[in-house]
Amino acid sequence: MWKAAAQQACSETEFGVPVAPPTLRAAERRLGRRLPAALADLLRETNGIGGPYGLDTVWSLERIVEDNLHFWSDPTFADLYMPFEPLLFFGDNGGGDQFAFVRVPDGRPDVFVWEHEDDSRRWVARDLRDYLDRSLTAEGDDWYR
C-alpha cells in the first residue's frame, strides 16, 4: 500500500528493504515508545522512502532511532531549541528542516515541520499519506512553506 501510494505521487521514488517485525520491536524498545501505526506499517513494507533529488522523504528505521535519541538527549540543544521530546522525527527536506509526528497527545496522525533556522514547528499534513502526497508531488524541497 505505501509503496504504491508513493509511486503514484512520484515515479522517481526509491525504497528500502522491509523491516522485520522483531527489528521494529527492538527499535521501539530503544526509543522507549511505540512508533505511530502508519509509520510502523510503512517501515514493514519499505525501510524508508527516497524522493526526488535524493531527498530522504521517510528515513530508514535506523536513522529514525539514532536521530531521535540524539535530539532527545543532546544537552547542547537545550540552550538552542525548544524541547524535542514531544516530537518523533522521520524525514527531512535535505536542507535541515525535519518532519515529525507530535507524540503528545498520543495517536495524533498530523505531521509537523521543524524549521531549524528559527526553531518553529508548524502543521504541514493531516497524516502520513497526506505528507507523502504533498512532499512527493511538490516541485522542490520547500513545498511546506
Image (tube, grey):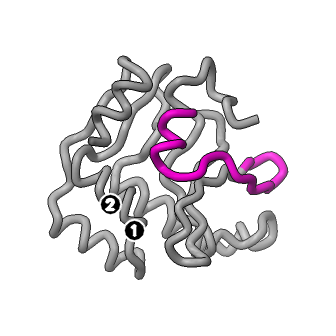
Which stretch is magenta? 115-134
Horizontally, is 28 left or right of 111 in the view? left
The answer to which image quadrant residue 96 occupies is top right
Mark 2 residue type: Ala
Q: Earlier in the sequence, mark 1 or mark 2?
A: 1
x 53%, y 66%: residue: 70
* Rendering quarter of residue 120: bottom right
Residue 118, numbered label:
none
Residue 77: say if magenta.
Answer: no
Q: At numbered mark 2, what does the secondary structure look like: helix, strand or loop?
A: helix
Residue 134 versus residue 81 in the image, above or below: above
Residue 40 rendering spot, x and y as whole percentages: 32, 60
Is residue 14 toward the left or the right of residue 100 in the image? left
Residue type pointed to by label 1: Leu
Q: How many marks?
A: 2
Which is more toward the observer, 40 or 32? Answer: 40
In the rendered structure, does residue 127 fall within the stretch colored magenta? yes
The residue positioned 25% from the left and 44% from the top of the image is 46
For label 2, the crowd category at 10 Å Cα-Cα, with few meaning under 14, some 14 to 19 and many 20 or more, is some
Marks 1 & 2, CB-CB < 8 Å contact = yes
Q: Position of residue 4 (x, y in %)?
A: 29, 32
For the C terminus, give its image quadrant: top right
Residue denoted by label 1: 35
Mark-to-mark CA distance, 1 and 2? 6 Å
Residue under circle 2? 40
**In the image, is residue 43 above or below residue 81?**
above
From what the image shows, is residue 129 above or below residue 140?
A: below
Q: Taking 79 as reference, is 99 left or right?
A: left
